[in-house]
Structures are given as structure tokens and as C-alpha cells.
Image (tube, rainbow, N blue to C red):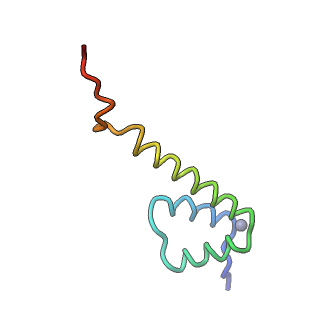
């Protein structure tokens, strides 16, 4: 029985998790791996930082309904 995920599988799940939530079992296995593998824990931290940074950029920087960005012509 192969309870532990490989690092490759973990990387796949990490990027997949940014788009959609994982199943409970996948999530548990992922966390188990991250708690035992410093390498993947680093990757996960970087991915989450990147993801939240780009989400922030999208919500604040590129909002077409932002009133301040609609400068009336003089
Ligand atoms: Zn790993």
C-alpha cells in the first residue's frame, strides 16, 4: 500500500488545489507529505504566496469598475 504521495504527485496536487478544492483524502495525504517533506513544504508556501499576490493584483489593479481609473476627458 502506497500511502505517501511522491513529490511529483504533490506538486500536481498543489497547483490543482489553487483552482479547485481537493477531496478530503487527497488533502490529508497532501498535508501528511508536506509535514514530512521540507522541499514540498517550501514549494507549497511559495505557490500560496504567489497565488495570493496575483489574486490581490487582479482584484485591485485591473478592476474596470474602479472609479479612480475612469478619468473624464478634459
Ligand atoms: Zn516531497
Residue at 55% over, 58% down:
15
Pick whichever, 57 or 28, lies toward us.
57
Placement of the N terminus among the 4 image quadrants: bottom right
The quadrant of the rendered image in which ligand 1 is seen is bottom right
Residue at 46% over, 43% down:
57
Q: Which residue lies furthest to the top in this view?
A: 74
Is 36 placed left or right of 10 in the picture? right
Placement of the C terminus among the 4 image quadrants: top left
Q: Which residue lies furthest to the bottom in this view?
A: 1
* Residue 45: % across, % down: 63, 59
Pick whichever, 47 or 26, lies toward us.
47
* Residue 73: % across, % down: 25, 17
Task: Relative to 2, say whether 66 is above or below.
Answer: above
Is 40 placed left or right of 65 in the picture? right
All told, the count of numbered labels is: 0
**Location of residue 6 by image quarter:** bottom right
Pick whichever, 47 or 74, lies toward us.
74
Residue at 55% over, 74% down:
27
Is 69 placed left or right of 13 in the picture? left
Amino acid at each position: 500500500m502506497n500511502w505517501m504521495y511522491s513529490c511529483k504527485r504533490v506538486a500536481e496536487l498543489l497547483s490543482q488545489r489553487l483552482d479547485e478544492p481537493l477531496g478530503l483524502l487527497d488533502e490529508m495525504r497532501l498535508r501528511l507529505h508536506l509535514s514530512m517533506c521540507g522541499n514540498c513544504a517550501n514549494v507549497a508556501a511559495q505557490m500560496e504566496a504567489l497565488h495570493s499576490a496575483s489574486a490581490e493584483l487582479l482584484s485591485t489593479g485591473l478592476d474596470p469598475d474602479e472609479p479612480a481609473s475612469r478619468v473624464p476627458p478634459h
